[in-house]
Image (cartoon, helix red, strand yellow):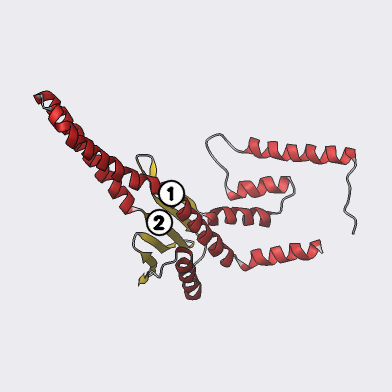
Amino acid sequence: MNERRYTEEEVSTIFERAAEAQQAVRRALPPGEGLTLADLRAIGSEVGIPAELVDQAARSLDQQGREATRTFLGLPVGVGRTVDLGRRLTDDEWDCLVVDLRETFDARGAVRSDGSLRQWTNGNLQALLEPTPTGHRLRLRTVMGGARGSMIAGLGILAVTATVAITSAMTGHIAEALGGMGSMMGVGAALFAVGAVRLPGWARTRRRQMEGVAARLALATEPPARNELAAGQGDESV
């Protein structure tokens, strides 16, 4: 099948209409506010986008989840991701999620249920499945407590060293204290560095792992109607 080629006039028309559609979306969005899903459907209909595809894109955005980061002195000591699934997970789907968590984080972890709450934990790493009015919410979170503790200890030693230095200077014994202070400052700086250096790489790895878990779960829990729509589009393209 030969691919259609557009004339120069048609190309101009296509990009003109695309630009008009983009401007229509920008005009419809009030500054500092937002649009409801119904508003998005209305805009989509104006530019020829089916409401089903708008709903599909909105669901995929929700299922990507919201990211959260805890910082200490500007460094990430904790990362998390919250995903609203839009429906309840079945027992089999929860079991598959636990398997995925164990493989992704290379940890067996422990599974626990408390009423409608379910969780998988491995030390500071947690996966919590919580009920919502529309189904379930998955909350992934972890902290690197060891690195934060090392940084706090290092700062503590540096603070003590500074106090000793000030006191020695005021009493005129700074020369005698210099040798000890140098060693204490080295220990404090080393402890702080050991904790700080590991954090950026650790946080990137955990974010990537959580994104992968969320993406696979979203794919596994796609509504049947969405799959049928995708299949229908595939058939039409043949």
Residue under the image location 45 percent in, 70 percent down = 98
Question: Which residue corresponds to mark 2?
Answer: 141
Residue under the image location 29 percent in, 48 percent down = 150
State which quadrant residue 143 falls in: bottom left
Whether residue 85 can be seen here: no
Whether residue 201 can be seen here: yes
State which quadrant residue 216 falls in: bottom right
- Residue type marked 2: Arg
Q: CA distance from mark 1 to mark 2?
A: 8 Å
* Quarter placement of the N terminus: bottom right
Q: How many marks?
A: 2
State which quadrant residue 9 falls in: top right
* Label 2 SS: strand
Q: Residues within 10 Å of mark 2 (few under 14, many from 20)?
A: many
* Label 1 SS: strand
Question: Which residue corresponds to mark 1?
Answer: 68
* Quarter placement of the C terminus: bottom right
Q: Are marks 1 and 2 in contact (CB under 8 Å)?
A: yes
In the shown orientation, is residue 178 left or right of residue 91? Answer: left
Q: Nearer the viewer, residue 74 or 184?
A: 184
